Image (spheres, coloured by chain):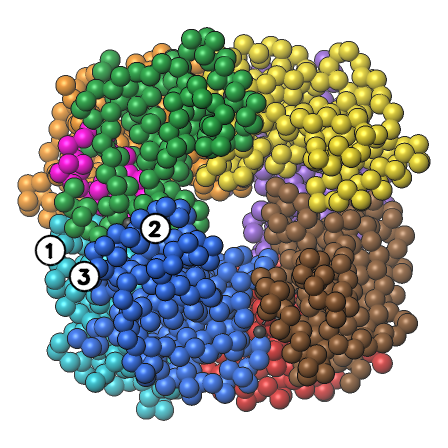
Chain colours: A blue, B red, C brown, D purple, E yellow, F orange, G green, H cyan
């Protein structure tokens, strides 16, 4: 593709008929395509997909190989952030990029996070997935020299406001050089990481 | 006073004439009073005050002695949070309570904060003053067993939204048992601490 | 636990499989755990829990004894605030702390509230649970010298805005020293109370 | 006038030239007119006005007599609400209606308010002027059978949000039959009171 | 009742068991009670109620007679506002007050509205029920000398924002002396009218 | 110009030096240009402009003639909306289009508005300039078959929210076929009218 | 009709009984009527309608003929915007106006959009249907001299905020003379177009 | 520095005394420091700075050399976005990184933008500075394979909402892999670019 990112379809709000038509047309062209936000019930009727439930993603067409060594690390604050992290990881895998995943190291348990910082900072790009107050993003971005991308999530209730608080907190973070994507947008964060990788390899 | 907290006057929005009248009436009664948000220009014309510029507070009437040992610790994330911290400290001093102040230990420099945690946690009550993403509050509240009170501040721009982001982030914090007062309300946080001291004396 | 508050799991958004796994792992460790926001349908399939429907909480592991005398009073404005109050009471019970509950004393019936003020003020800590305009919190905080913690609730419609109005009203309250937790966060208010108790008992 | 309310001009945003033109044209017609939100500096250059600084109002034309007995009571929560209360009182006086004013009986000092309730409830219409959490309105509306009109004010900072919190709290009040006008709109509350009076007298 | 308004129960958010208990307790006391926001499915199992589906209200206990002549007029802008208007009419009927209802005279068909103005203005109190831009309220309040109470409704989509736009438009209305209650609060508007009737009887 | 609308410069936020440079460069090219939101103090130092204070606009270059007959009518609700109306009229004049202006016919004085409807509806395009509740726009759009363009203005206070309420009310209007431009954007409304004229010439 | 736009009924929130009554009454009068936001399940029980599922619209009464040549072009950014575009097209067809539809030319694939610009600009009126960032509207409005009407849609998640972002972006667009209707309001945009056409043809 | 980004001080809200103290302390340490948001009046009294007015930045200490070839391109939509762009360029220069600046290529003049796309896409990293609807960011991000960082600016009025609309539009952009920093945060965007350069050196 012109900008180096493959075709992707956001399935939320599309009917089974529409998604099936897209998939068949992609296969007929011998092309590849990534489906995101595809619910398991819909996926069940599309057996030609390589479907992954935790991320709600499906691959259409041939898979590509990933290298062993990951240049990208995906870190989550809490259990509920896992789905968004998996969406990022699968988007990377679809493009042949490996990633390391580190779960559940929110700042409420600071020592667990500090213990993992050397491993995190060994990656060129770090994707930080966190909801509620999103303090994880500020803490990590202040400790590593990697490219750091924040993904606010919609976990939490009340003043968490469906992810708006995590989003604003990441944008207002005092850690220099943290950039941010839309709420729950694991796909988008992976695309940012892919842009960093592809322009380096040119 | 009935609830154990002395008379206090919020001077913002009051004229010099109004403030002078209040001060003179308090002195005539032989009483005491705390003035908050009193600008230096106004204070200059009220020489009977014990005025403190960094906190914009004035004491009317006799001062009371403070014990040497502080049971309350006031911690700030950045330089711009100092005024709010001083308002808290002066409110405590007005009521005869000592406090320890620790400045500028925001999470962007995590090691500086971690180094101070033992000192912070040695206090019964910790007041956490932070703006922008307010990540300091979540990190400290997750590390100490003290009473922890968050004061969001209006520092920052754009997505900091005049303190709304810090306020929401503290309310949505994943650290258990962090309570919060209004934006820039150093006075209120000190009053929470005073309620603890007065009801938790042996 | 490091900060004196036991392990707690927010079940909202977790599947039965995930919750069962957590419960079994806690029991295997011989540990204890508090489950919050656990719907009755899910609880029905987890008979090893000490489940309490009105609070949607479950205790995993051995219960601890509570003293007879309550140091904490939980007060609600209306009938719909009871669930949040029960969440606070059960969180306290899980940690071995007794509480007194006083229901339905909103300010629309001021005499009923005034009649209970002596009983309320006899407690060291008062948790005020109120939705809509949350006027209860300002009235009580202005009458007692106890530590006062406000829990705004999401009851009401229209301008109640799902609890945002109660939250803002408590934060802007003219009663000095009222601190606030997230909307509907009975768990959090109890944790604040526990911090006050534990630092006094040290 | 057709709807029983006299001509009124909101001076905020109008130049001295524009206001002078209006005043002269009203006087030329031998008519009467009420000016609101007129700053003292502007009023100084318009000596033909009956100007009242605390309310920022001016009367143009002949004054009308007021009866001795007031049917309307105006109550404020705090000192900063006085200007709005005066705007209401002057709007009533312009229309020949007397009012009783009771200042500074916010709920933080509940006993002072309770002491005045009999006097307040002796009036047919009660105008409640309060900012911040506006708890005064709920408490009084729950205690008197009079017509009760809430005027939220823009006093306070942070979560007071320029009067939005007081406005929402009054709208969401659990006291039945409290109606509300715009933030700081003392003029409007007086007009509501006048409508109640004029339809009774027909 | 002390404030002249009968007992009322907001059924939204209460279970059948809770509502049945309230009803039975009221009947046992030989008292009366108004149930609002009671869904038809719940009402079906409570045959002792005088239930009215369009208003979702139920009367418990003896009904009271209404006079023939209505002093209150309820006006709606569109078809979807009828339910809120009926809630107001039934609240009045519960208290023995008659009302005239005029439906579907929104300003988009101005001539239809103008034709009804004489009838509307013959009432002492006018309740204006309108959603979306709520222009009906400004137009009528500018044409009649009656007491005018606006009830914004949650009809419409997008920029109607669930009634927030209608609410703000009524509050900002240029028609003098329009007061407002919460979104969809037909009950509250009726209570304002009842306060007028009870304090403005000869 | 490609889209048929001349060069226009928004002067708000530009320095005198920058504006002078633009003007001189336009004149050097022998071209024409419209300056908007140009404060009188700045205009005073630019004598080569055809400046119009009430609209804060300046014409650079040769003026073009306007036909006598106006196809566009600009209507305002209140006195404070005049500046925005003038910005629209001058933008039209800059492009050689005549307009009729009708001031101060807000719905609070419905008869004055109704009296002008025949004149208004004789124009092909009607620009409706109104703040606060913007009810004028709904009423007129429901009465004329012309193209109707709403310009919400930032007049009013409190719930008027700087024009947001007028904007939302126009968007949610029940009158079919009312389109809207940004708050205070008289320039934009005129450009909509110009697009109509240029594409709907015989 | 007086303003040249036919009778239309918004079915959202109306019951089958209510809609059937409206339809039968229209047919009995020998009149015509457009139903919008009518769900397929409801339409299935109303076989006398000319129903169109993708637009959720139904025609009641005789259809009118459309000319072959379209003067209106409807353009969408993405697949999910199609329903709103169809609502606009059907509203036009109901009034006898033809339209050209161009789907899925969002700016992410700029070359596809640029290729269609000559065709788009050949129409007198262009309706631009776009959600999320709505960049399509600014780009097209800057390239064509036609009348341009923006319809923001509620597609997208997180910061798309149900169409609010698209709405604000269109209103703040730097392209001169773009006017806007409510979120998802295809009907309204068509009515704006009809007003442009009907005043030209007079 | 640990994360590869030099010391930076946000001068907004700091007094001359505070800034002078910081500068002198940095010089005494023989260190370097970047001052941002430093107003010209303050800078005038600090002659030891390398001050740049358009960006409001000052360099303290030795300057570092920049390479000739720029790997980073900074693009602005309008004239008013220049200050933010300069802040980014100076932050890069402070760290020894060259940048290309392309001004005033907003999408309203699409051909001018398209003409510059080859030059833009030749850079590894592209910083897109745009206010109002921020459509520039979506268009460019859809055309280049570079790392793309959006900086929303606070230019515009009304629905531009001080940069909130540009921010939300960038976050909701349909172009894949666009990440975003805070409103007007040219400093932050430059830091994102620096993280890329430092981790993607060969
Ligand atoms: N009802 C509740 N409200 C707010 N926080 C809670 C609640 N229940 C548990 N928590 C906290 O939320 C955290 C959630 O962690 P997790 O179970 O990993 O999603 C726990 O560590 C608790 O401190
Ligand atoms: N539809 C309604 N809208 C607003 N308030 C109501 C409504 N119905 C009843 N109320 C009031 O809400 C209070 C609710 O009390 P409760 O039933 O204890 O939750 C009652 O005392 C009534 O004054
Ligand atoms: N008052 C105004 N409101 C909205 N847009 C305007 C106004 N005046 C000029 N413009 C437009 O704003 C653009 C601003 O461009 P610039 O002068 O480069 O900042 C111009 O191309 C005009 O189309
Ligand atoms: N223009 C700016 N925008 C955002 N952050 C900045 C800016 N300038 C400096 N900073 C950061 O803000 C922090 C402010 O720290 P302080 O000077 O202690 O208030 C610094 O460490 C920088 O990383
Ligand atoms: Mg966890
Ligand atoms: Mg610092
Ligand atoms: Mg009750
Ligand atoms: Mg007071
Ligand atoms: Mg209708
Ligand atoms: Mg006027
Ligand atoms: Mg597409
Ligand atoms: Mg430009």
Q: Is label 2's Cβ within 8 Å of ligand 11? A: no
Q: For this view, does A80 lie left or right of residue A126?
A: right
Residue H65: image x %, image y %?
A: 18, 83
* Pointer 1 residue: H115
- Measure how far apart labels 1 and 2 are at the Cα level: 39 Å
Res G107 visible: yes
For image coordinates 37% across by 35% down, the residue present is: G54
Dot 1 and dot 3 residues touching (CB under 8 Å): no
- The answer as to whether the residues below labels 1 and 2 share one chain is no
- Measure how far apart labels 1 and 3 are at the Cα level: 17 Å
* Pointer 2 residue: A20
Image quadrant in which the N terminus of chain C is located? bottom right
Residue C17: image x %, image y %?
A: 60, 67
Farthest left residue in view: F29
Which corner quadrant of the image does residue D8 belong to?
top right
Magenta-highlighted residues: G117-145
> Pointer 1 indicates a residue of which chain?
H
Which corner quadrant of the image does residue A37 belong to?
bottom left
Res B155 visible: no
Is residue G120 rendered magenta in the image?
yes
* Pointer 3 residue: A2
């Amino acid at each position: 593709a012109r900008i180096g990112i493959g075709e992707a379809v956001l399935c939320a709000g599309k009917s089974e008929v529409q998604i099936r038509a897209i998939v068949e047309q992609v296969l007929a062209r011998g092309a590849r395509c990534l489906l995101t936000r595809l619910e398991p019930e819909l996926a069940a009727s599309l057996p030609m997909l390589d479907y992954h439930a935790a991320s709600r993603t499906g691959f259409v067409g041939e898979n590509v190989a990933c290298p062993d060594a990951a240049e990208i690390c995906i870190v989550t604050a809490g259990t509920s952030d896992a789905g968004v992290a998996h969406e990022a990881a699968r988007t990377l895998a679809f493009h042949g990029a490996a990633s390391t995943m580190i779960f559940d190291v929110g700042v409420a348990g600071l020592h667990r996070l500090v213990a993992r910082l050397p491993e995190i900072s060994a990656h060129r790009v770090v994707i930080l997935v966190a909801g509620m107050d999103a303090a994880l993003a500020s803490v990590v971005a202040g400790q590593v020299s990697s490219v750091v991308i924040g993904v606010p999530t919609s976990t939490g209730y009340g003043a968490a406001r469906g992810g708006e608080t995590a989003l604003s907190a990441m944008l207002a973070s005092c850690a220099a050089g943290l950039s941010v994507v839309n709420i729950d947008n694991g796909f988008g964060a992976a695309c940012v990481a892919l842009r960093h990788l592809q322009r380096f390899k040119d």
